[in-house]
Amino acid sequence: MVDDVEETCQLYAWALGLEGHTVQMASTGAEAVTLMETNHYDAIVMDIMMPEMDGIEALRQIRQLPHGQQIPIVVLTGDRDEDCRVEAMQAGANTVVYKPILPLVVLKRIEDCRQESRDQ
């Protein structure tokens, strides 16, 4: 879970934890890239607007990592501008969802991305 708003990270970590998932939190895109360089994750949920490195650049860098090519990435953003969605998808997001959204809906989107990957 990558978001510079700590409360957002905590809410999603708590809700996904109730569903049996372990969630690691990062507060910047740069931190997310660093974590991805040394860890393997089942999925990433990432905001777009963050300090140091925004979600778009983090997406690009994560997709360049050997193990970052297949991981489902859900962009969670408050920016409903169509250009933002298109840019996120071009950078490597599997899907874009808009805040506010229930954590279980985000989990469903992650599962949908995994299924699409298996179907290909």
Image: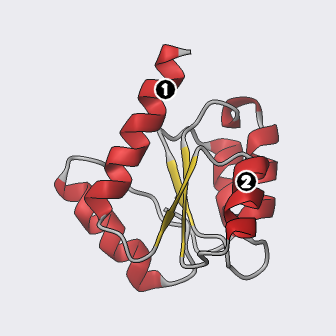
Kind of element beneath mark 2: helix
Relative to residue 71, is residue 19 depicted above or below? below
**Residue occupying image coordinates x 78% and y 51%:** 91
Foreground pick, 51 / 87: 87
User: Quick one: label 2 or label 1, which is nearer the N terminus?
Assistant: 2
Residue 10 relative to residue 67: left or right: left
Image coordinates of residue 5 in percent, x first then y, are 51, 84
Task: Bin the neighbour count of mark 1 within 10 Å (Cα to Cα): few under 14, some 14-19, many 20 and up.
Answer: few
* Three-letter code, disc 2: Leu
Does 21 appear above or below 87? above
One can see residue 33 in this view = yes
Label total for image: 2
**Residue occupying the point 66% across, 70% down:** 48
Q: Which residue is mark 1?
A: 116
> What is the crowding at mark 2: few (fewer than 14 residues within 10 Å), some, or many (at least 20)?
many
Give the number of the mark in front: 2 or 1.
1
Q: Position of residue 40 (x, y in %)?
A: 56, 38
Say which mark, if any, is on residue 59: 2
